[in-house]
Amino acid sequence: MTTATPQQATSPVPPRPEPARKKRRRVDMRQYGILAALAVIILLFQVLTGGRLLYPGNVSNLIQQNAYVLILAIGMVIVIIAGHIDLSVGSIVATVGAVAALSMNNWGLPWGAAVALSLLVGALIGAWQGFWVAFVGIPAFIVTLAGMLVFRGVALVLLTGGTISGLPRAFNSIGSGTLPATGTPDLITLGIGALASLALVVQQLKGRTDLRRLNLPRERTVSFVLKIVIAVVAIMYLCYLLAYNRGTPIILVILATLVLLYSFLLSRTVFGRHVYAMGGNLYAAMMSGVKTKWVNFFIFVNMGFLAGLAGVVSTARAGSAVASAGQSFELDAIAAVFIGGAAVQGGVGTVVGAVIGGLVMGVLNQGLSILSVDAAWQQVIKGLVLLLAVAFDVYSKRRGGR
Amino acid sequence: MSDVILRMDEIVKEFNGIRALDGVSVGVERGEVHAICGENGAGKSTLMKVLSGVYPHGSFDGTITLDGKPVAYGSINDSERDGVVIIHQELALSPYLSIAENIFLGNEVQRGGVIDWNRTNLLATELLTRVGLQENPATKVLELGVGKQQLVEIAKALSKDVKLLILDEPTAALNDDDSAHLLGLIEQLRTQGITSIIISHKLKEIRAIADTVTVIRDGRTIESFRVTDSDDIETRIIRAMVGRPLDHQFPPREPDIGEEKFRVEDWTVHHPIDVDRVVVDRASFSVRAGEIVGFAGLMGAGRTELAMSIFGRSYGSGISGRVYKDGKEIQTRTVGEAIRSGIAYVTEDRKRYGLNLIGSITVNVSAAALGRLARLGIIDRNREYAVADDYRKQMNIKTPSVSSVVGTLSGGNQQKVVLSKWIYSGPDVLILDEPTRGIDVGAKYEIYGIINEMAAQGKAVIVISSELPELIGLSDRIYTIAEGKLTGELDRAHASQEELMRHMTAARNTGVQAS
């Protein structure tokens, strides 16, 4: 109980306030807030399910079953930062799933070509919607509401109301397979975990060195180290769980790649900067020479592409294509993005936030299923979580004075 | 001796410690047309908002007496109940409702919540006849031009048994015919016993219809006098409007003016929606390297429209004319093209058009020149930070760090961020639209210093400003613009506020140019 030392900084929350840096700290608070919420929800269900939530098999399932939300949330967060919305992604998932199944089972395409075709179809659908939003100037809400109806219909037409199953095993393994494993525990998975941890540490240290060199405000060493330690522990624990199941799910590799790629896209590239600029102040972006129409167009092309990927993944996971696939996926994705701290007015949001938001939804799904909570009540709970998350965000922003 | 309908005494109104009105007094006689004049920002509109209850009783000091009785309006509804109706510069009609619905909006002809449409339309027709508007009352307002919408506003005022009608720059957006009709209507209402207060910049208008004029400057009443037909009325108004001593200091500067850098010829711009209306009319001007050229014009004269249309056609339709830089014709069809051609435009409204208020200083500074910081589409964020931090020091932007969110900065510091952004885009021609609006005196001085520095680097600098002392203090040469036309060109030695104001208020067809 030594409390008098001025250096004391043992709490895991960010460093103590310097008045001048208040703003910065608040932003961090929001980021950490989501993470903390995820941790609380995991712990809660871990207790409620008597430890079953984090059974190796369940963790693997959680990832594979919720991959679609995460993939869609990555596209959706870009759409929402730019100040739009996309209601059509669930229907695109169904249409693309139908195209994938048909191309393999009816048109005889090899699975690789079928995947490529599916992604292309997704991107083309995105281009169609992007055209109306960007160049005709119709609000995305309307365009994608139309798309929601149109592509649900197209999926029904393609599948003539039936189901296509018996898809190639190689294709199905995209959704439910794992990387080759060496046995139990799987050393490859553990190796991947170690490499990922190392990469994380190196990247963080390098970033911090740059900050020091430029004399930019940095986190306190204590919280910086603590953050890395927690991250590494989380990564290794996840890999440990997976190594004792069947190994690394293929979908996890895809997801990790997407998260890295899109985080980079949004935070480091000119394109990403333009997206934020347009969401922050569309007129100022225009008056700074941003080609706002083309940026809008590509945002929707990208959303279509990712919806196509989600279509491939969820079809592979289900092992069959049905016209009712992807029902209400758009709402899951939108919810994930807002739970992840994006602003309804646009201009704010991150890929990592959206993915964490998606994980919150995923853990809720999984935990409630293990507890065999009625599907109807699951909806009620998920709805309330979304409302609370955004209410918290609005409240903390208002307290921030703007 | 005379019948005074309205008396406002010693009105003081503060916003965050800044006095917008500093003891204004106005007396209006029953049945007259009373004009209120003053420069932009003199406090005219604030005064009218005090009168109409937009700023409720208690939020200002001073007394208002209507018909001999002191009044205390808590809202605009209270003042309307007394027959005081204000028609704002921006019309407040609902475009998708019909004329009749708009006239009786909030004041419906009803019984038990059910609208009596027949009576509504009947009454509306009568009111339309009174204002001389021949339209079906069922016509939607969005199908009407601005002139006719103005008449609908007046009809709406008449429906409330108006005694005192306040018109805030009623003809600013109207063409000559519509203006003439509107002024005729005001005359006619006077014969019906309705008193009008009209805020206007247009001196010929005031001379034509006003009985009395009150001039306000810096939140104070300067003088109030009867309008006669003599010529020196306009001179008298102008002198009263501008007659303050120079109250800003300007940093010293030795102009070093070179060859012609930038030239615009026959630039014509039409209104973006009302495409037949000419907003800028065959404007031609030039700026030399190292020269600071001012543009003086009253609100709505077409200054900003001229600048924005040149900068990537950000405003207007049917734009024609030619732009030259260093003697060669350049294209400025999109903002990107204008920036690449070496033009930068610092917008008048920095919050709306200039800044991403939720973004950091860094992302705002780099916003117009990301290409300079990126390779293969990837931004070098360390260099970006270094650039922003450099400007922070150079411009003396007061902030804990360049990661601070721009929305938290003061107006002056925000303006420095905008200036940094455009200077970093590496322009040869820098157009500054109201660069010191809403900025305190200290920051103004700093910004003048930055403007001088840009000229010293050999850039062509254009400054658009409503503050005449500022233009005179900064510029080597000043163009005046009125109703879309360049009406004069004065060099520093010959530019006085009176002279500028004379050109700025010049009527369209009676140009006062030295011929």
Image (tube, rainbow, N blue to C red):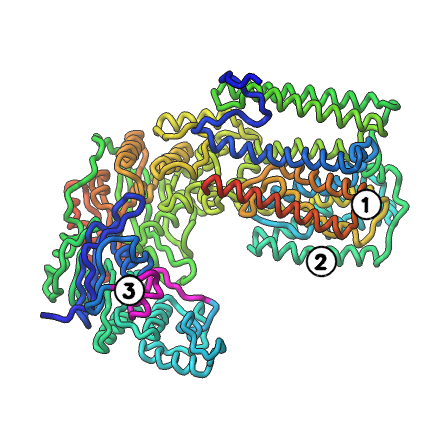
Q: Chain of mark 3?
A: B
Q: Nearer the viewer, residue B69 or A310?
A: B69
Q: Estimate the x, y position of residue A120 in percent, counting from the top left.
A: 73, 44
B171 over A338 or under it: above or below: below
Q: Main secondary structure of the magenta part?
A: loop
In this view, the mark in front (2 or 1): 1
Classify 10 Å Cα crowding around label 2: few (below 14), some (14-19), many (20 and above).
some
Mark 1 residue element:
loop
Residue located beneath label 3 in the image? B167
Q: Please state which amino acid type lies under the numbered disc 3.
A: Leu
C-alpha gap between disc 2 and disc 1: 35 Å
| Residue wearing tag 2 | A150
Label 3 to label 2, Cα distance in Å?
A: 52 Å
Q: Which region shows up in magenta?
A: B71-95
Q: Quick one: which residue is furthest to the right in this view? A: A166
Please identify, in this view, whether the residue under mark 1 or under mark 3 is nearer the observer. 1
The answer to whether dots 1 and 3 both sit on one chain is no
Residue at x-position 44% and y-position 38%: B340
Q: Are marks 1 and 3 in contact (CB under 8 Å)?
A: no
In the image, is A280 to the left or to the right of A121? left
